[in-house]
Amino acid sequence: MALMGFLKKQFIDVIEWQEPGDGILSWRYPMQDNEIQNGGRLTVRESQAALFVNEGKAADAFGPGLYTLNTHTLPLLTNLMNWDKLFASPFKSDVYFFSTRLQVDQRWGTPQPVTLRDKDFGAIRIRAFGNYSWRVADPKLFQQQVSGTRGTYTVEEIDGQLRGLMLQHLSDAVAHSGIPFLDLAANQVEFATQIKAAVAPAFANLGLALDGVTVQNVSLPDELQKILDQKIGMGMVGQNMGAFMQYQTAQSIPKFAESAGEGGGGIAGSAMGLGAGVALGQVLAGNLAQGLGTGIATAAAASGEHPPVQDVMALLEKLGELKDKGILTEDEFAAKKTELLKKL
């Protein structure tokens, strides 16, 4: 009966794998009750590897090529040596194929900002994204650590794990690169090199080789970007803060006049609520008082006479109104009053 059972088995002459499409990393050849015939052939194509597993243990791995399977190369994978046991082989063999080609354009990115330590700003939170490529480099280790005895194992199944490794070592890459955040945008190639160096050992532990990493963008969250923009703006102003304030005042005058004509609402009203309107009013009042005083003095000098008393009094009344509204301080009002009275 054992002999009849053996005769019913089918012998496998050729073992090969024609990949049906992208995305499959590992595929187990369907052996069932079939036996590998002595002298059969194993075909491993470019970008493939084959692994023989006996009694649950990985035996030999084969790279691209055409191999003849016989009792010299695979003494445990055939029952043709066991005539005395009526061809009842005690060994069960499985053949796994692996795709070793590059898995390109795999995306990585920070779903949430990552907190890092920076030379210039201390602790910051950044966003970054890019892509990377990898391949199966050690089929035996990959089968032991990842794919196991699965009939098929796909890129999609390991994608989340690999992206997690990329993000886990992102802070290590920044720390070892020594590149401040403000220079990262101009040194993305160096940053990508540091990421690869930090992550590659974790990939190797899974039987994978990290081939390349690119960084396409590094940025701050919106709220931190606004603060950085303000810091950059202050740096551009530098020591010429007075000129900058005068420019800002000149830009605000048309909006101030427009809002004043609408009953004090709008931009000026909001600025007053924030205290900016007071500062703007002081600048305008100072300019107005200086202009009025200069105008009276110029007219008097041209005529060779002292300015009319009524003009000086009218100006003092206007300055008094500005003081009562809080636009001029007591000291500013007193100084201007003394200056005008000397001209009588």
Image (cartoon, grey):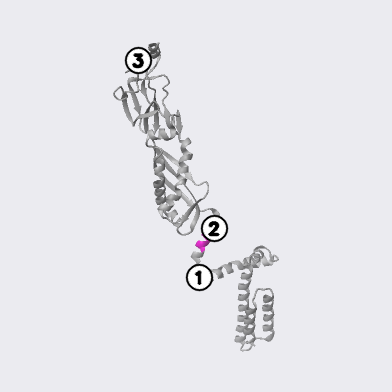
- Quarter containing the C terminus: bottom right
Of residues 275 and 139, the one drawn nearer to the viewer in this rendering: 139
- The residue where tag 3 is placed is 85
Residue type indicated by callout 3: Lys
Which residue sits at x=60%, y=86%? 301
Residue found at the far right of this picture: 263
Residue 274 in sight here:
yes
Q: CA distance from mark 2 to mark 1?
A: 22 Å
Q: Nearer the viewer, residue 248 or 52?
A: 52
Counting residues from the start of the chain, the first of labels 3 and 1 encountered is 3
Report the residue at 50% width, 70% height from top: 240
CA separation in Å, label 3 and label 1? 99 Å
Tell me which corner region of the image, top left, top right, bottom left or bottom right, holds residue 204.
Answer: top left
Residue 226 - label: 2
Q: Nearer the viewer, mark 2 or mark 1?
A: 2
Q: Secondary structure at mark 1?
A: loop
* Magenta stretch, residue numbers: 225-233
Characterize the local packing of mark 1: few (<14), some (14-19) or many (20 or more) Cα atoms within 10 angstroms: few
Name the disc covering residue 67, or none.
Answer: none
Question: Which of marks 1 and 2 precedes in the sequence?
Answer: 2
| Amino acid beneath label 2 | Lys
Question: Between 227 and 248, which is closer to the camera in this rendering?
Answer: 227
Q: Quadrant of the N terminus?
A: top left
Q: Tell which circle, 2 or 3, labels the residue nearer the N-terminal end.
A: 3
